[in-house]
Amino acid sequence: MAELKPQSAVSKMLNAAWIRPFLFLVFIVVAWDLAIRLFKIPAYQIPSPGDVIAVLRTDWPELLRQSWPTTYAPSAASRSRRFLGSPSRC
């Protein structure tokens, strides 16, 4: 029978449940930024990740204020459909 070798610190970290999704997120953001730069896509079509972060920093109070109606409207519509007996469109 083969003996199990103790895992190194790097191996333990790479096998952590959170690291792979985090690395995938980093990959997606880097690919997004590279695509914007390589294909010279204008900011009005697709903003770069840096532009998105800048707007989140400066306008977060307004975005937070507007998030409630955006979240509440679909939720209320779904509840009213169920209350009125209308079938859902899944």
Image: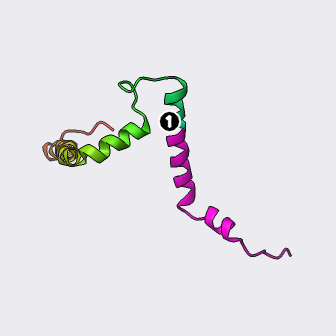
Q: Name the residue at the right extreme.
A: 1
Which residue has dot 1 on it? Answer: 32
Quarter of image, res 14: bottom right
In the displayed structure, 15 sits above or below 25; it is: below
Magenta stretch prevailing secondary structure: helix
Task: Please provide percent x and percent y for residue 29.
Answer: 49, 42
Look at the image and say whether residue 15 sits in the magenta stretch: yes
Quarter of image, res 42: top left
In the displayed structure, 17 sits above or below 83; it is: below
Left or right of residue 14, residue 78 in this image: left
Q: Which residue appears at 43% of the width and 34% of the height?
A: 48
Q: Nearer the viewer, residue 24 or 71?
A: 24
Look at the image and say whether residue 20 sits in the magenta stretch: yes
Q: Quadrant of the N terminus?
A: bottom right
Q: Which residue appears at 35% of the width and 25% of the height?
A: 44
Magenta range: 1-30
Quarter of image, res 55: top left
Q: Quadrant of the C terminus?
A: top left
In the displayed structure, 64 sits above or below 35; it is: below
Crowding at mark 1 (Cα within 10 Å: few <14, some 14-19, many 20+): some
Residue 33 seen: yes
Amino acid type of the residue that numbered disc 1 sits on in the rendered structure? Trp
Q: Nearer the viewer, residue 40 or 2?
A: 40
Left or right of residue 80, residue 19 in this image: right
Left or right of residue 80, residue 40 in this image: right
